[in-house]
Image (cartoon, grey):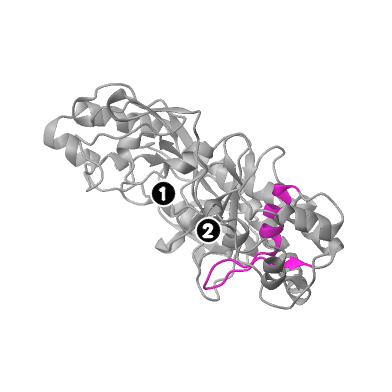
């Protein structure tokens, strides 16, 4: 039986050893809230020639008109250089562009400076990702975000983040967990511990630190069960799948005054619980939703700024809807609800983390059980030997 010690809680990066750095797209225009904007931007790019095309692409050290790259895993984009490409836009994938901000990305390796193909390789219906946020002292807010989408992985305010896939292979195969961890926890708690329970527990009890997110593993089986249940509620809110979330008591934010075609300002009236979007008004908006921060950045302000910031004149990022789409209003109303519900669960998260800290399974006990440190092989992506991918110039690579 695993002993209980009062040494420090393990780092998430020890429990989930394969950690991937964020994607670095290198240019803003291949990402947009609406898929139609990306297709229009691509059409404008392929209609251009020579120096104009290079300027529109926004050539970098990693990507230019004559750069030859491999195909992104699972995608069908062309791999020949962009200099004379006049074909249709590559496929579009939905990504987690930032905290609770789902946008579309052109899945074309020629447009992305550092795409992290190893993450694309394991993405799919059975995959879940945790995104560890950059540490900001006393910032509050969740240290981890969860998504089933491909995560960009960057933290707000330009701080580094990290991507942690739950599985190391496509199809939900081979958990990205320290070898032996699930067996040790199953013995300790007297019940089966599937990989997703470790993820949901981390969402519920993880706490931010300068050296990374620490995950106190409780000694008490009942506390573990309670935390996993809380984590599943958090996961449902992060993923926003299935039934739409609702605030208790029938408090539903709705549009009190129509939003203008091109809003440029977002203001909040705390007394009236009203969010002003230009001349438009949304209410009731709980203060907890307005105050919800991730890595020191207010989520609602960041979400709005990414949809209204002025684009560079003549650049592709300026191609988009002429007026504020109705879909954005629906997304904003849902985001307000999600943030309010997450804030409501915040005190339970804090209480759970503190209780687990007080009586936990620490790193010394995990080392004694042979779980930590994880082997170096667990920190590297798994080899995929049976999956063909197109290399530069249409050649095939066997990985």
| Placement of 200 over or under 287, stated as above or below | above
In three-dimensional space, the C-alpha distance between marks 1 and 2, rounded to whole angstroms, equals 20 Å
- For the C terminus, which image quadrant? top left
Verify whether residue 193 appears in magenta: no
Within 10 Å of disc 1 (Cα), the crowding (few <14, some 14-19, many 20+) is: many
Residue 299, labelled with which disc? 2
Number of marks present in the image shown: 2
Residue 255 visible here: no
Q: Give the image quarter of residue 116.
A: top left
Q: Which residue is mark 1?
A: 23
Residue in front for this viewpoint, 232 or 199: 199
Residue 69 coordinates in the image, percent (x, y)? 30, 35
What residue is at 65 percent from the left and 51 percent from the top? 338
Circle 2 SS class: helix
Q: Nearer the viewer, mark 1 or mark 2?
A: 1
Based on the picture, tell me whether residue 215 belongs to the magenta stretch: yes
Q: Which residues are magenta?
A: 194-218
Q: Earlier in the sequence, mark 1 or mark 2?
A: 1
Q: Position of residue 313 (x, y in %)?
A: 23, 45
Is 274 positioned to the left or the right of 135 in the image? right
Q: In the picture provided, is 290 more to the left or to the right than 185?
A: left
């Amino acid at each position: 039986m695993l002993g209980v010690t009062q040494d420090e809680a393990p780092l998430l990066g020890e429990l989930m050893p394969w950690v991937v750095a964020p994607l670095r797209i290198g240019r803003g225009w291949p990402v947009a809230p609406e898929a139609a904007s990306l297709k229009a931007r691509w059409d404008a790019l392929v209609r251009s020639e020579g120096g104009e095309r290079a300027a529109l692409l926004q050539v970098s050290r990693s990507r230019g008109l004559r750069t030859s790259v491999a195909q992104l895993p699972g995608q069908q984009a062309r791999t020949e250089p962009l200099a004379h490409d006049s074909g249709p836009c590559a496929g579009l994938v939905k990504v987690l562009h930032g905290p609770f901000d789902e946008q579309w990305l052109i899945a074309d390796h020629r447009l992305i400076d550092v795409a992290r193909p190893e993450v694309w390789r394991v993405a799919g219906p059975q995959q879940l990702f945790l995104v560890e946020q950059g540490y900001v002292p006393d910032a509050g807010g969740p240290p981890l975000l969860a998504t089933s989408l491909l995560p960009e992985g960057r933290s707000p305010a330009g701080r580094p983040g990290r991507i942690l896939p739950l599985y190391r292979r496509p199809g939900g195969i081979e958990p990205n967990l320290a070898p032996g961890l699930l067996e040790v926890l199953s013995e300790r708690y007297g019940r089966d511990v599937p990989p997703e329970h470790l993820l949901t527990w981390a969402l519920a009890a993880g706490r931010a630190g300068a050296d990374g997110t620490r995950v106190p593993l409780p000694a008490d089986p009942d506390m573990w069960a309670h935390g996993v249940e809380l984590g599943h509620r958090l996961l449902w809110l992060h993923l926003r799948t299935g039934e739409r979330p609702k605030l208790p008591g029938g408090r539903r934010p709705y549009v009190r005054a129509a939003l203008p075609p091109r809003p440029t300002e977002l203001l909040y009236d705390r007394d009236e619980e009203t969010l002003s979007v230009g001349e438009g008004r949304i209410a009731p908006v709980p203060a907890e939703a307005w105050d919800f921060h991730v890595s020191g950045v207010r989520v609602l302000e960041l979400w709005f700024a990414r949809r209204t910031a002025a684009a560079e004149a003549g650049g592709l990022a300026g191609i988009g809807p002429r007026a504020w789409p109705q879909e954005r209003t629906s997304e904003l109303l849902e985001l307000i609800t999600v943030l309010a519900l997450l804030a409501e669960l915040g005190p339970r998260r804090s209480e759970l983390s503190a209780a687990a800290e007080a009586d936990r399974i620490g790193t010394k006990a995990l080392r004694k059980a042979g779980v930590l440190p994880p082997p170096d092989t667990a920190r590297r992506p798994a080899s995929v030997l049976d999956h063909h991918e197109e290399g530069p110039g249409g050649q095939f690579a066997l990985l």
